[in-house]
Every structure is written in structure tokens, then in C-alpha cells.
Image: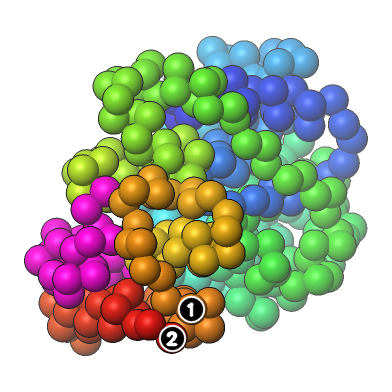
Amino acid sequence: MSAVVQAPWIARQAHDLLAQRGHAWLLQGPSGLGQYELALALVSAWLCENPTSQGACGVCASCHAIAVHTHADLEVLMPETVMMELGWPLSEKAQDEIDKKTRKPSKEIRVDAMRDAVEFSQRTDARGRGKAVLVFPAERMNTITANALLKTLEEPPGHVRFVLATEASHMLLPTIRSRCLAHTMKWPEASEALVWLAEQGLASDDAQNLLRTAGGRPADVLSLSGSGLSPEWWGHLPQAMRQGDARHLADLTPVQAIDALQKLCHDLVLRQSGAEPRFFEKSQLPSSIASLSVLTDWFKRLVQAARTAEHPFNAGLMLEALTADAHQTLMSKG
């Protein structure tokens, strides 16, 4: 099971949710707070042969089956790209299609997979502990896929429970949200997060600096650390963009670059509004800041760019265009 499950703030939330009744949970909040890890902790406890109030035992046959992603009573619904990233097996048909290059892995939760999950929920459980369906990221369901889930979510057959985990609950159908018990993810205290990050092998100074860069989200700190982006790189980003230096973004994917620029824009809006920045130190931001309207327009363009960032026509040209837009915005006086 993922080490993130052992984070104390995840363990506390799992304990609280397991003490409550309900067949469908919606775990919601911004990225980096552990929605997937909490969802996995819940389904592990539901299916565990020797559960406690603290969660799954971690040593029984059921826990082992979940750890190796082969549990017969657990259906995992994710985009194929996410399943491959997290090590969950695809269906034989999907794997065959991808291996033969007849199509690329889906970035959405496919309606075929949802229909398989509905059929799964109607079968008898194999281990006598009921069944569970884990959906992550739930916002990757399109309207057709979500509608295929609705009736089963409202009237689940037999002893089946659902947990939907999302980083964008506003993108879910209202009918999906209304059929779930909602839980908003808790933010860990900085001191607690730093202790945990040290246990994951991060140096104290790097962990503290990256925790600020990640907006206080520990899981995002691990992603930043794994990407090779140092605190020094982040600290120099505002000045590099003000100078129009596209080389500063050269080692990033368009998705990473847009995320970094959105954080910069966010902090500039806070500074312009008289609030404290969240991702950067005050001293790292330019003293002369564009107007709120200019910054708002820039953020809208970044959101638009994010829609095609995973499939850019030319990644290098996209990074240069992002840098030029950032430079123009940061040099704006109005």
C-alpha cells in the first residue's frame, strides 16, 4: 500500500469516515491532499478480513490482494493513463488495443469501463466482505459515463460501496454529487507535513521550501521533488519570466510550465490585492505588478492553454509562447 496512506492526516480522516455509515463517499478538495490515498484506505478497510477502527489490518489476504492490485471484489475506475501510472491492470481488451496501437490510452474514464463496473456491482462478492468501487479522478467521467453510474450509485445492489475521489468536484454532475456523502479533505499542519516529508527522505530545507511552493500540499511536494525542480529554480521563475527567458522552462513539459505560471499569476493577484503570496516569497516577486484585469486575462489564457497542453502541436513552441505571454504580462503597466 502507498506510503502516503500512513500520513497521519490521512489516517485521521480514514478513522473518522469509517466510523460513519453510508454507501457512497465523495472525497473532494485541491490536488496534493491525498484523495486517492484516502479512497484506497477506505476500500481497504471495507474489504479487510480483520478491520479495526483505525482501518485495514494490512496483513490479511484481502489487504495483500489490494496491495498487488488483484482483489476480486474491488473495481477501480480510472482513466487508462492514470491506471498505468499507478500500476492498476487494464482490461484484457483495452490492453490488447493499446499494445496493438489501435488507439492510445484514454485520459477519460471510458463508458465501457463504467458499464463493466455496473455489471461488477451486480455480481456476488467473492470473499464475503462485500464489494467496493473506487473512482479517481472522478471529474474525468464525461456526461455519458457519469449517467451510466447514476442509478447504481443511488440504489446499489447487494453489499457494494462506492468512493469517488476528485480534485475538481465542480466538474461533476450535480446528480452525482447529491447521491454521495461529501467529505472535504483536511489540510495538514505545516509542522506535521515537514516531519512526514523528512520520513520520505527529503532534506529539511528542501522540504520547507518546496512545501511553500506546493501551497502546503505534501503530496505535491513529492511530485515537485521527483520532477527535479529545485527551490532555487522556483525562486528565479518570476525574474526569468519578466526577462522573457524561455530557457528557464526548457526542462518542463507544457503541463508543468502552465502549473508553475498559474501559481505565479495567483501570487501576483494576491500581492496586487494586498494579501500575502502563497507559493513565492514576497522578495521573489516583481515590485511593479500588472493590474488585476491584466492578471485575470493572463490566467484565463493559461486555463485555455491547459486544455491542449497534453497534446501540443510543438512543445518547444508552446513553452516559448507561454514565456512571451508571461513576459508581456509582467512588463505591463496597466
Q: Position of residue 76 (x, y in %)?
A: 56, 50
Left or right: 52, with 228 as reference point: right
Q: Position of residue 189 (x, y in %)?
A: 59, 27
Q: Where are the magenta residues, as a range?
A: 235-259
**What label sits on residue 109 in the rendered view?**
none
* Local crowd size for mark 2, using a 10 Å CA cut-off: few (<14), some (14–19), many (≥20): few
Answer whether residue 57 is visible to the viewer in this image: yes
SS under mark 2: loop
* 239 within the magenta span: yes
Q: In front here: 172 or 81?
A: 172
As drawn, which residue projects farthest toward the left?
247
Left or right: 184, with 251 as reference point: right
The residue shown at (19%, 63%) is 240
Q: Which residue is mark 1?
A: 291
Dominant SS in magenta: helix
The residue shown at (26%, 48%) is 235
Q: Is residue 53 above or below residue 93?
A: above
Quarter of the image for residue 210 reads: top left
Q: Position of residue 70 (x, y in %)?
A: 48, 37
Number of numbered discs visible in the structure rendering: 2
Q: Amino acid at mark 2?
A: Gly
The residue shown at (13%, 77%) is 316
Q: CA distance from mark 1 to mark 2?
A: 6 Å
Q: Is residue 275 above or below residue 8?
A: below
Left or right: 297, with 47 as reference point: left
* 220 within the magenta span: no
The residue shown at (17%, 71%) is 243
**What label sits on residue 334 in the rendered view?**
2
**Residues at badges 1 and 2 in contact (C-beta under 8 Å)?**
yes
